[in-house]
């Protein structure tokens, strides 16, 4: 592996485990937001969220296109997590693991900037990253849309073929590979798609396996 690579990390379920506590909170907050601002009951709000997710890949996109919802208001209302540090499930060796990876490090998340910054601070790793690229920076065009990736490259003055995308979501890795990035899938799976260059069960494995990346 070339040591001038730039490591681009997803945030939720890559740098920390959001599934046990944080994702349920955000999901509930999104449903409640639709109930409050669109006048729906819980079942209808949940169904509309599923519809927009299937059609656009994100609830927010449907709300912006069909209901003129202010994205900043929606993201603030749904991603303000009470007692966030207590809800984060982290690996104790995360900081040391990241420090073992040579090269620049960036975060590319579909979450809003204020939430991403709070999570990075709670994880104690904010100082290890040169940039936190959030949904606002993509013009509210979340991964796997290639538009956000291209903006990330431009903002950080890097070429795709110098970057390694480390991510838990296959659709996002597929876009990354098409653009020329090396790809690392964080997942507990025996089957690896062709557009994944390396699969790891957790980030702790990455430093000793990174040599497999060409």
Image (tube, rainbow, N blue to C red):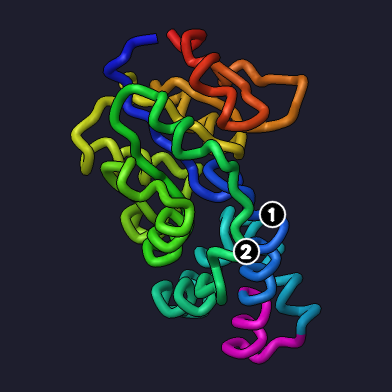
Could you say which is closer to the camera, residue 120 or residue 176?
Answer: 120
Disc on res. 178 = none
Residue segment shown in magenta: 30-41
Looking at the image, is 138 positioned above or below residue 195?
below
Q: Position of residue 1 (x, y in %)?
A: 40, 9
Q: Quadrant of the C terminus?
A: top left
Q: Main secondary structure of the magenta part?
A: helix
Residue indicated by mark 1: 19
Give the residue drawn at x 29%, y 46%: 131
Could you say which is closer to the camera, residue 145 or residue 196?
Answer: 196
Secondary structure state at the residue bearing disc 1: loop
Quadrant in which residue 185 is drawn: top right
Mark 2 crowdedness (10 Å alpha carbons): few <14, some 14-19, many ≥20? some
Give the residue drawn at x 63%, y 24%: 200
41 vs 3, left or right, is: right
Residue indicated by mark 2: 87
Give the residue drawn at x 37%, y 62%: 113
């Amino acid at each position: 592996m070339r040591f001038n690579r730039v490591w681009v990390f997803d945030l939720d379920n890559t740098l920390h485990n959001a599934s046990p506590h944080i994702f349920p909170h955000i999901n509930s907050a999104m449903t409640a937001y639709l109930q409050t601002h669109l006048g729906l009951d819980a079942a209808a709000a949940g169904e509309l969220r599923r519809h927009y997710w299937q059609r656009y890949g994100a609830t927010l996109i449907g709300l912006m296109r069909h209901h003129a919802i202010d994205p900043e208001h929606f993201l603030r209302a749904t991603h303000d997590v009470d007692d966030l540090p207590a809800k984060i499930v982290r690996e104790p060796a995360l900081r040391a693991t990241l420090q073992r990876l040579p090269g620049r490090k960036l975060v590319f998340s579909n979450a809003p900037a204020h939430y991403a910054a709070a999570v990075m601070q709670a994880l104690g790793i904010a100082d290890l990253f040169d940039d936190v690229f959030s949904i606002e920076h993509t013009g509210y065009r979340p991964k796997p849309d290639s538009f956000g990736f291209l903006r990330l490259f431009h903002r950080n003055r890097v070429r795709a073929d110098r970057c390694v995308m480390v991510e838990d979501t296959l659709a996002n890795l597929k876009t990354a590979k098409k653009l020329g990035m090396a790809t690392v899938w964080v997942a507990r799976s025996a089957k690896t798609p062709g557009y994944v260059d390396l699969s790891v069960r957790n980030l702790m494995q990455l430093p000793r396996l990174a040599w497999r990346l060409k």
